[in-house]
Every structure is written in C-alpha cells, then in structure tokens.
Image (spheres, helix red, strand yellow):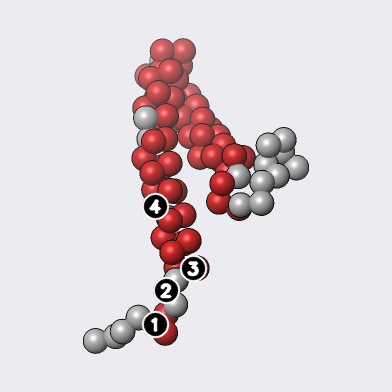
Amino acid sequence: MIEGCHTSIELARPCRARGPAVALVVAGVAAGVTYGRSSGDVAGAVPGVLGAAFAQLPAIWVLGAVAAVLAAVGLVGVRHRDIPVG
C-alpha cells in the first residue's frame, strides 16, 4: 500500500491524484523525445512538450472532481427507476 493511501473514503485517497500526473509525464517525455528526434533537438524539445502536457493537468483534476460528484450523487440519491421517462 502506498503511504498516505489508507483513508476510508475511496474518492479522497491522495494516491489517486498521482495517476494522471504520471501518465502526463510519460506521454510528455515520449512526445518530446519523438518530436526532438524528428527536429534534431531532443534536449530543447522535451521541456516544452512536457510543459504543454502538464498544462492539461488542472483540466483532468476538474473533470475527475465532476465525475466524483456525479458518481456520489448517483450512488446516494437518484436511481434509474426514479427518473421519469418521456
């Protein structure tokens, strides 16, 4: 178990926030190296592409928070049979 990931509330686990950042690092470095190799300047391309990848992180956090709120509302209050159709 990762240190700090032992809370009882599943959606509030601190380790869950690391996943998107790690994915962006991997994607940013891969894209930076690929672009750098094609342009001939790997050392100059990686920081810019990595920064552009990290610029997406706040949007990922917001969408994750919205999804968590919608899931919590759906789990607590509204069931499919309670929604009127038509």
Expressed as whole percent of the image width and height from the top left, the position of residue 59 reads 36, 40
Expressed as whole percent of the image width and height from the top left, the position of residue 71 reads 46, 62
Disc 4 residue type? Answer: Val
Among the two numbered marks 3 and 4 on one chain, the one whose residue lies closer to the N terminus: 4
- Residue contact at pointers 1 and 3, CB within 8 angstroms: no
Among the two numbered marks 4 and 2 on one chain, the one whose residue lies closer to the N terminus: 4
Circle 1 sits in a helix, a strand or a loop, which is it?
helix
Disc 1 residue type? Answer: Asp
- Residue contact at pointers 1 and 2, CB within 8 angstroms: yes
Occupied quadrant, residue 57? top left
Q: Residue at x 31, y 84 (%)?
A: 84
Residue to which mark 1 is pinned: 82
Residue to which mark 2 is pinned: 78
Per the rendering, the mark at residue 43 is none
Residue to which mark 4 is pinned: 66
Disc 2 residue type? Answer: Val
Among the two numbered marks 1 and 3 on one chain, the one whose residue lies closer to the N terminus: 3
Give how far apart the Cα atoms at labels 1 and 2 are: 6 Å
Q: Which class describes the residues within 10 Å of circle 1: few (<14), some (14-19), or many (20+)?
A: few
Rendered view: 6 above or below 77: above
Q: Residue at x 41, y 42 (%)?
A: 60
Give how far apart the Cα atoms at labels 2 and 3 are: 7 Å
